[in-house]
Structure formats: C-alpha cells, structure tokens
Image (cartoon, rainbow, N blue to C red):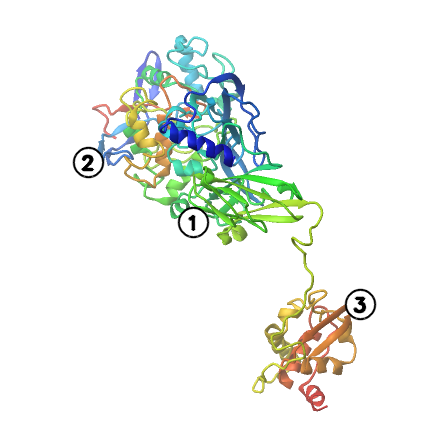
Amino acid sequence: MRGIRGWIGVVVLCAGMLPIVAGAKVSGEERAVLTSPPAVPPPIARKHATKLIVELEVRERVGQISDGVEYTFWTFGGTVPGSFIRVRTGDEIEFHLRNHPDNKVPHNIDLHAVTGPGGGATSSFTPPGHETVFSFKALNPGLYVYHCATAPVGMHIANGMYGLILVEPEGGFPAVDREYYVMQGDFYTRGGNGDPGLQPFSMEKALREDADYVVFNGSVGSLTEGGALQARVGERVRLYVGNGGPNLVSSFHVIGEIFDTVYVEAGDAENHNVQTTLVPAGGAAIVEFVVDVPGTFILVDHSIFRAFNKGALGMMKVSGPEDKVVYSGKQDQRIYLPEGGAVQKMPGRGANAPKAESAAERVAMGKVVYETNCVACHQADGAGIPGAFPPVAKSDFLEGDIDRTIDVVLNGLEGPLTVNGVSYNNVMPSLGLSDEQVANVLSYVMNSWGNPGGDVTPEQVAKRRKK
Amino acid sequence: MLGVGVCGATWAGGELVSGGPFTPLFGAKGQAPVDVEAFDLDTYPVTNGEYLEFVRRVEKWRRSKVPPIFSDAGYLGHWSGDLDPGPGGGVGNRSPVTNVSWFAAKAYCASVGRRLPTLEEWEFAARASEDRTDAVDDPAFRERILSWYARPTGETLPPVGSTFRNVYGVFDLHGLVWEWVWDWNSVLVTGESRADVAVDKQLYCAGAAAGATDLSDYAAFLRYAMRASLEARYTVRNVGFRCAADLSPGDTR
C-alpha cells in the first residue's frame, strides 16, 4: 500500500489537485458483500471501478451489552458496529438504506467516505417501513466511519449506529494473512455498569460523557473466549479499527504486540513501531503486525479503567510453536526480599497490646493480628497460595506439636517444607509479635476454617521464647 | 363534552386543553413564546374500530380504493381486508389505527366535524404529565418519553388508553404511537420536506444544535425528526393520529 499510495500522491501533485479518479472508467455492476464484525469482506479482486450496489437495513433490536444486561441497540445491518462495507476507489456506489417497518424512529446515514452534503444524510432520511436510494463516487481511498445523523444525532450514535466503510486504493492493499474488524463505542445506561435487566439509554450521562460501558464490537466480551480473534504464529494481521464514540477517543493498544505499521487516522501517513494509536471518535486507524509467538494477546483501550472496568477488552488467540528466543515464558519465580534471603526480624512491636480476658476474646483479637500480619501470604480463607505459601486451614503441619508452630511464629521459618503433601521452599520472617499476640493469632487460626479448635496461652508462648 | 353530528356519525368531543404560552423546541432565537389558544383534543388516538366505521361510510378511503397520490402502498397494511382489521386491529379493534397517510387522517377528522391538531397544539398538550401542565423540565418525565421512543414497535400495538392520562384528561400522547398533526412539516419546510435547507440546518449532524432552544430535550428532537422524515402520502406502522377542534362559542368548560 505504501508504494501505491506514494505513486498516486506524485500523480496528484503533477495534475494540480485534480480528483484522483474523476476520469477513471467505470464498468459493470456488482452487489457489495457485507460482513458482520469481526469479519471483513474479501479484498476486491477486480482491476476496474464498477457500479456497486450496497443494501443496508436498519434494525432496532434488543441485545446483550453485558452478562445479564440488555440494551436496545439501533443497528446498521443488525450488528454493532454495523456491516463492514468494502469498495474500491472510483466505484460508483448506489446506496439503499432500508428502515425496517417495526422500527420506532427515522434514520439516515452519513458516510465519511462520501463527498457531498451531509455525507449522504441529506438524501437518506428514511421513516420506518421505507427505503431511500442515493449514489456517490468513492473519490478518496481510506477507512471511513459511517453513522446515523438523524436528530438527536448523539442518541442514534450512542445506541450503536456506526460502522466502517473501506475504500481500497487502486490495486488494493498488500496481502495479509488475517483481516479483522474492531470498533469501539461508549454506552450510557440508566443503571450503573452491571445493573441487570433491560437498561434504557441515559441522556443525562451521555451529556456528561460519563460512560457505563466502553466496548469493542457492541458488547462486553464480544471478542473474548469464543469470540476471540484467531491467528497462527508467523501470520501477518491487519486490524481495521474504528471508533464510533459518541464521546470517547480510544487509545488502541494490543498488549504484547507492537504495530509494525499504522496507517495513522486511516489515512496515507504510515507510522512504524507504534505501541498505542489514537482512534478519534468518528475516526479510524489501520494497524498491522506479525504474530511471532503463541498466546493470548489482549486488545484494550489503554485508558485502562475502560478496559478492566467498562469492557474495552478483546482477545486475539495465537496458536503455533513457541519461539523461546523472542519470548521465553516464565523461567523462574522466587520471593524478593530486599534484606536478603535469611529469616528476618520485623521491628519489635506489640508490647503494649491489650490482653484478652476470655478464649472468645482471644480469638477475636487474634483475627485482627492475622489480618494485619498473615493474610497477604496465607490468605483470608487460610488456604495459602499453592506452591508459594502453605495453608493454615486444615493444615497437617499445625496438627503436630503446638510448640513447633509457636516457634515458627516467634522465629520465622526458612527452607523446604511439606504441608498436606505439597512441597514449599520459601521464607517466613519473624514477625516481632508479643507473647499475647502470638497466642491470640494462633488461637484464631485453630478456631477458624474448620480447624479443630483449642487455644494457646501467652504463658505457653513465653516458655518457648525463653528456649 | 360536546356532541357534533356529521353525516349521521355522532362525535363525542374530547378534552379541554386550556392554552397558554410556551417556547417550542425550534423557536427562533429571541422569539417570544408561542401562544396556544384553548382547544378541544381527542381523549384517545383514533382506533382501528373507529377507522373501520369511517371506511364503511367513505368508500374511497378503503384500502383497495385509495388513490396512490394520497397514500403509499403501505396504507392499512396491517389490516386483513378492506373492511376487516383482523388481528392487526387489536383486541376489540381498540388499538390505534396506523399506516394511514396525512391525507387520510385529515379526511377522517373532517368526516367527524373536527380537524387535526396543529403542531403547536399537539406539542403544548404533550408537555403535560399526570399532574403538571408543563413537565418538560422534569428529567424523569423526559426520560420516560425517551425510553419509549428507544424501543422498537411490537407486533401488535396495545389498546388506546394503555398509557398515562395527563392533567387535561388526554391519554397516550406519549408511549403508544407517533401522531400526525396538521402542519407536521411546518417547522422545517417551505416546500418538499426532505430537500428543504431548513432540514439540514436544524436536524442533521452539523446543524442539529443550531436552531433548538433546549438542546437536552432529546425526546422532542426525536419527535421533530420523525415528523421531518415523513411526506404527506407516507404510511408508517407506528404513526397514527387523533383529532381536535376549536372551542365552540358556547363551550363553557
């Protein structure tokens, strides 16, 4: 594409800014192949411009925006984003916009690929149960957003009325192994993120630009698990990335990949070795990369709370052989202790801690000690972390000699250890607890998570400390 | 209630909408509020049953007889026959009649001695909630309207009277069907509605904010957009109508 576009650029300059394809001959007639996201129609094989008939139906329909959350989407072609349209520079497109009779409101279409008033919107205003037709010539190559532009425009877009139209340059793009269609959008619902049921559009939140959902391809999880994009190691992937908005600009990023080529804002300008590319609301970008190693690569809007809290997260699953030189995988995992690997002593504390008056109080006070000192490794449920930190719930280590357990809490422990048949090799520091605190926390552990009960007294601890 | 006899049909009048000033959505900048005179508005949209009586009386408005110049091919498309609404009429033919052109709606109202409400009359009456004559500044009221606009039309429309009764006693101004008004395109057009420059100025992407007085009243935007998408001969599955009348001199309500 680079070479072809560069060549066209030269011609344009020489011709004194004449439209690139104004004189190109148009022959034949075809019906456009439309695809639902994330699929992209096949590249255009013909070597000439043609009359291309595009038929797009508007459907208002209830769909899932997240697990258990429904939304009434307004769609071009039944999906959000709408059907992908692929044409060639110089094509003369006869555009049919059909508004299904069951729809509630009128719609139109503004294609950013159109040169003319309203991008087609002035000629495609269509009430339910009607169809409008207009024609345009694709003058400029590029990847363009289309959207509904009927008042209130923001609401039509917020309900999902956007998609992409690709105008291939003459000669097309360089071949790649995979092409996918990904488009971001932000959604505004009366309830908050995750509130169940059919959620109506919230005009108030849309005006404040306070999105409840920011998603790829119309719903949370549309590109994860079963919907994940697929590729094989060694393949070259091209993503046609759009952003319908209505409000938010996307910082599009694929975790663990570097875009070796980005067509910036989906225009002629190429950038290379890009980590994150901005995709404006009502704009697009084309990104390309080769997948060198297998694994799951995460697509995000790197305005990162949108990714992990509002849904702007997709997946590309790459299968094939490992390349340990490019990426080794995990080679080792160990505990990092700035003080060094030997048992360390925490600063002394707890001398003035209050004393428990009863066994029950001892357990209650021990819970506080546990949550302050132990929970990070042994976990709130006492289960530990397999392979790293042994359990203290139903632990066979604790069933043995209580003095041994007291010693561990007093002095720390280092080295190989088997608990419930699982081997551990780690370091537990000396925690610097008072006799009272050690007694309390061990009493808490012995009376929690199905452990057999019993208690430890400060006197027992004091005896061990003197050893 | 007033009774008017026309051509053997007896029409019971509707509800009194006491008029007053209001600022329409597309009021010109600095324009004084519009004054709406008190008028009489049908309690309910016209039903399939009532429309059936009309086409029984007036043959030229039957489905097979209507001239194409007055209606597109979808006219009464949800009916089973010329004189048979069938299941599309709703239970007891009590669902609002739709798929009628503006010409047909106008003819119906004339046949009962009434007329279509004007755009300003309709919009004025539609500002009322159950207990306020002007609830447009109430976000909950707006959002209730908007949430109906956002839902697709179902297979069969519910019967008239199934939504709320506003403070004037008028039902279903929101939540059942869109409604034709006398001058549905008057805000936007001087000539053919879709080609008029005022449409781009006021309703399309770049100009959607330019002429409006209340940019956050999305529900009103949708209504104006819906009307602007229509031509007088169009029929739409969710566009019905109701009739209105000037107050008679003797009306002392």
Of all chains, the one bearing label 3 is A
Q: Which residue is mark 2?
A: B32
Using the image, determine if residue A404 lies above or below residue A318: below
Q: Nearer the viewer, residue A28 or B8?
A: A28
Do residues under tags 2 and 1 come within 8 Å of each other at their CB atoms?
no
C-alpha gap between disc 2 and disc 3: 86 Å
Tell me the amino acid under the disc marked 2: Ala
Local crowd at mark 1 within 10 Å, few (<14), some, or many (≥20)?
A: some
Q: Which residue is mark 3?
A: A421
Using the image, determine if residue B110 lies above or below residue A321: above
Q: Quadrant of the C terminus of chain B?
A: top left
What x and y, as percent, mark residue B233? 38, 16
C-alpha gap between disc 2 and disc 1: 35 Å
Residue A26 shows in this picture: yes
What x and y, as percent, mark residue A93? 46, 22
What x and y, as percent, mark residue B4? 30, 18
Question: Do pointers 3 and 1 mark residues of a single chain?
Answer: yes
Using the image, determine if residue A218 lies above or below residue A336: above
Q: Which residue is mark 1?
A: A210
Disc 3 or 1, which lies upstream in sequence? 1
Q: Report helix, strand or loop for mark 3.
A: loop
Asked whether, in this view, residue A244 is left or right of residue B109, the answer is: right
Do residues under tags 3 and 1 come within 8 Å of each other at their CB atoms?
no
Residue B176 shows in this picture: no
